[in-house]
Image: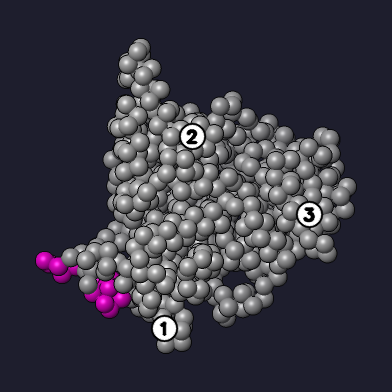
């Protein structure tokens, strides 16, 4: 069994001149980073961490923009055998106070010893620190050690054990930041091995093209660790550039003969609906062998419009694939076989809604199309169980649970959360779905998580923000997501009870909620509904029943 | 010219982006830096402007430095419409 550092050392010796990463930034020429350059850059950070007395096994937070320093510092922490955790940086949309509070709370749980950041974010990072916390050093990118040949004999990472935790992966928001998924070398490498086989990865021929942020598991694992460790060239653009110019993904695939990409479902709709033909002149997408839909519910309609739009540019419709993934299994749990389009299961809508059974449609009644997320990876077992943990037969909806040789070690410093998530060695995903002929269909969520554009959002974070707005009855707010067919993702709804029955006053409060929540979470709200007393449905124990409120909201919207 | 631009922008932003049809948006209210219009919706706004007024906002211009409120955006559109009628044809 090997480790990340062993693999880096081998690449340094065997393929120094192969291009590892092509960095793209709008308005700048593309920057090629060879394996040699990547490891030289990483070594500078490893030496810097040593200079700053950061010890192996300590956590290092990386707060950096898309770019070479993020790549160098990540692998530098690995070579030092410290545990890197990539954090979102403060963007202009988010309030600095909230960012600071979230960062401070993450620090109090994860207890990092150092923060690596750039001059532009240094002040923000420092302002989250309090006397006596775990952070001993804030390392700014312009203070790192000069370049030198790496001495692998003295680099601590080379001596790491495969069981050691190699990195932490957080999801977003106050709640998400408090739960760092701790992954070992062994878990990540087992995942990469199983996943590479599922997609027939070929380091000689494959080129991965990505715009995904690295603080998200799909970006970090599929579009950063997989290419670097499996020796596949990665073309990486900034998520900020992509969202303003989604055609750049197609241009890059065409330019670099890209073969593989991973996208959340909304990106299929976004690309199909918002890219103008004039930006696709001369673009050839025929090399793209798999575009894998992952990290939020997959919709067959999204694939259809994407295929229709881009087939004129050489896209093969069977390139559109699906995957079900989560950080707790490093990444992939299932993958659709790449030699055919994902299976689409047509089922009776009413039987599905009322009896939680996926049965063939009855003639003359409404049907719905479920797209498969594929089959479990060779190293991962999945089961569908009822509330008592009893196995359910094919085509019956229940909770998806899974077990593999690539599961999380723990939620870092959170034994309580770890205990809740694991039962008898099985990870309880909190997602609902059913199996049919070995294909997994993910149909909903037991947990109240909202997923917008592939990003997990905890509704309780948004509710507590809404509670802070003057005029809102504290504790009388509810947040949930509803699927928007045009956008291909969920949209966030917040409902808040207020005293005033006056429409103009309600409007003012709705505006204030929108502003405060958006500024404090960087989540744009689609619907803000201010209601009078007793609108919100509570359970008998006084807890807010999010699904009941969602149903009530949808009914009112449609009436 | 500007008197037609602002109301059309308000209508589009309120109805399509914020889903609050009767929302009043002040001409000096921050749109981008406040997060009111998120990055995904910026593309929609750019496409709407192109289709409605026949002028382009480039993707590198979709940020708060180029425009952050209705009056700045209106001015930007108006100046480009003027430039267009004076010289260059709209479509390449």
Same chain for mark 2 and mark 1? The answer is no
**Which element carries disc 1, helix, strand or loop?**
loop
Magenta stretch: includes residue A407: no
> Where on the picture, by quarter, is residue A70?
top right
Label 2 resides on the chain identified as B
- Between the C-alphas of marks 2 and 3, the distance is 37 Å
Look at mark 2 in the image and give the residue it sits on.
B67
Left of A141 or right of it: where is A237? left
The image's mark for residue A539 is 1
Which residues are the magenta region?
A351-365
> Where on the picture, by quarter, is residue A112?
bottom right
Tell me the mark number nearer the camera, choosing from 2 and 1: 2
**Which element carries disc 2, helix, strand or loop?**
loop
- Between the C-alphas of marks 2 and 1, the distance is 46 Å
User: Where does the C terminus of chain A fall, quadrant-wise?
Assistant: bottom left
Same chain for mark 3 and mark 1? The answer is yes
Label 1 resides on the chain identified as A
From the top left corner, tell me how far across and down residue A270 is, in percent.
Answer: 38, 44
Tell me the mark number nearer the camera, choosing from 3 and 1: 1
């Amino acid at each position: 069994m090997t480790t990340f550092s062993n693999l880096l050392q081998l690449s340094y010796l065997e393929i120094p001149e192969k291009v590892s990463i092509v960095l793209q930034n709008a308005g700048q020429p593309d920057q090629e980073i060879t394996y040699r350059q990547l490891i030289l850059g990483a070594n500078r950070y490893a030496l810097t961490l040593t200079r700053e007395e950061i010890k192996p096994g300590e956590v290092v937070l990386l707060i950096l923009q898309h770019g070479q320093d993020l790549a160098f510092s990540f692998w530098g922490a690995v070579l030092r055998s410290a545990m890197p955790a990539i954090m979102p940086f403060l963007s202009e949309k988010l309030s600095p106070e909230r960012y600071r509070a979230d960062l401070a709370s993450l620090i109090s749980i994860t207890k990092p010893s150092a923060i690596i950041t750039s001059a532009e974010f240094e002040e923000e990072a420092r302002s989250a620190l309090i006397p006596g916390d775990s952070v001993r050093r804030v390392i700014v990118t312009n203070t790192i050690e000069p370049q030198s040949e790496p001495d692998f004999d003295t680099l601590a990472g080379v001596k790491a054990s495969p069981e050691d935790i190699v990195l932490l992966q957080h999801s977003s928001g106050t709640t998400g930041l408090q739960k760092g998924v701790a992954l070992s070398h062994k878990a990540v490498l087992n995942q990469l091995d199983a996943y590479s086989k599922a997609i027939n990865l070929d380091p000689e021929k494959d080129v991965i093209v990505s715009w995904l942020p690295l603080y998200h598991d799909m970006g970090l694992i599929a579009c950063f660790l997989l290419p670097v460790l499996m020796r596949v060239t990665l073309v990486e653009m900034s998520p900020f550039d992509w969202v303003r110019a989604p055609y750049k993904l197609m241009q890059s695939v065409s330019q670099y003969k890209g073969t593989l990409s991973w996208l959340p479902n909304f990106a299929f709709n976004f690309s199909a609906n918002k890219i103008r033909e004039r930006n696709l002149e001369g673009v050839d997408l025929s090399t793209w062998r798999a575009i894998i839909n992952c990290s939020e519910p997959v919709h067959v309609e999204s694939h259809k419009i994407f295929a229709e739009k881009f087939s004129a540019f050489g896209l093969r419709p069977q390139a559109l694939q699906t995957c079900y993934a989560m950080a707790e299994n490093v990444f992939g749990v299932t993958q659709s076989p790449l030699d055919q389009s994902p299976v689409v299961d047509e089922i009776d809508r009413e039987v599905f809604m009322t009896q939680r059974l996926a049965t063939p449609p009855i003639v003359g009644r409404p049907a719905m199309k479920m797209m498969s997320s594929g089959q479990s990876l060779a190293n991962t077992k999945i089961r569908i169980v009822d509330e008592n943990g009893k196995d359910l037969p094919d085509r019956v909806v229940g909770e998806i649970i899974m077990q593999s040789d690539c599961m999380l070690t723990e939620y870092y410093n959170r034994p309580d959360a770890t205990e809740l998530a694991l039962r008898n060695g099985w990870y309880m995903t909190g997602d609902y779905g059913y199996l049919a002929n070995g294909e997994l269909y993910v149909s909903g969520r037991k947990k109240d998580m909202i997923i917008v554009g592939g990003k997990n959002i905890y509704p309780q974070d948004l509710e507590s923000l809404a509670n802070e707005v003057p005029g809102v009855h504290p504790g009388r707010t509810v947040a949930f997501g509803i699927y928007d067919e045009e956008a291909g993702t969920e949209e966030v709804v917040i409902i808040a009870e207020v005293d005033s029955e006056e429409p103009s006053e309600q409007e003012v409060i709705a505006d204030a909620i929108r502003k405060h929540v958006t500024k404090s979470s960087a989540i744009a709200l689609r619907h803000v509904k201010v209601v009078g007393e007793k609108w919100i449905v509570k359970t008998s124990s006084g807890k807010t029943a999010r699904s009941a409120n969602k149903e009530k909201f949808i009914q009112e919207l449609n009436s | 010219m500007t008197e037609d631009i602002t109301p059309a922008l308000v209508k589009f932003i309120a109805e399509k982006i914020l889903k609050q049809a009767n929302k009043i948006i002040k001409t000096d209210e921050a749109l981008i830096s406040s997060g009111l219009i998120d990055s995904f919706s910026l593309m929609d706004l750019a496409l709407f402007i192109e289709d409605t007024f026949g002028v382009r906002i480039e993707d590198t211009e979709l940020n708060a430095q180029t425009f952050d409120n209705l009056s700045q955006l209106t001015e930007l559109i108006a100046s480009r419409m003027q430039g267009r009628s004076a010289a260059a044809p709209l479509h390449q």
